Image (cartoon, rainbow, N blue to C red):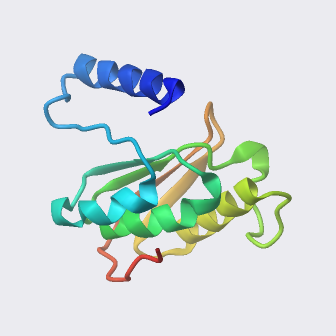
Amino acid sequence: MGKDERASTTSLEAHLRQAQVDGRAEVRVGPALEALPLLVEEEPFDLIFIDAAKDAYPQYLEWAIKLSRPGSIIVTDNCVLGGDGLGDEHESVNSRGAGARRYNHRASSDPALCSIALPLSSEMTVAVVLTKAEATPEV
């Protein structure tokens, strides 16, 4: 784990303690697409927070849906990208924007989700899982 990851993890763990949920919440750091299949035995999760490589956001959403239940909340950081994460999913200037656009398109068009992109602060997309999807995530 790098210096920045350690600092972020320490800060997040402090916030979890302050919110008095540290006994019910866990921080996991590492390559997400390697770690997500290991979580299948622990599902469902009530809250899923995604903040990772933007080009893989669509894959993370697939896993988030698989690991959720109706009523779960999926919060995805930096999805608006100053507007580059919104609009036609096939028209983006970089891989980060393209990944965020594909993510937002899926989150807004999937009938299993009710989603909103919030262009505030770190520009998050928030989705509530309405129904449990049976699709197998792409790896």
Q: Nearer the viewer, residue 136 or 102?
A: 136
Residue at x 53%, y 26% (from the top left corner): 4
Q: Does residue 50 appear in the picture of this structure?
A: yes
Within the image, what quadrant is residue 96 found in?
A: bottom right
Q: Does residue 68 appear in the picture of this structure?
A: no
Task: Give the vertical position of 130 relative to 81 (above or below).
Answer: below
Left of 30 or right of it: where is 53? Answer: right
Within the image, what quadrant is residue 38 found in?
A: bottom left
The N terminus: image quadrant: top left
Residue at x 45%, y 21% (from the top left corner): 7
- Residue 16 lies, in percent from the top left, at 28, 25
Name the residue furthest bottom. Answer: 135
Left of 99 or right of it: where is 125? Answer: left
- Residue 123 lies, in percent from the top left, at 62, 40
Task: Give the vertical position of 21 relative to 65 (above or below).
Answer: above
- Residue 57 lies, in percent from the top left, at 56, 59
Left of 68 or right of it: where is 11? Answer: right
- Residue 77 lies, in percent from the top left, at 55, 43
Residue at x 35%, y 52% (from the top left corner): 73
Left of 124 or right of it: where is 49? Answer: left
Name the residue furthest front. Answer: 1
Residue at x 86%, y 58% (from the top left corner): 93
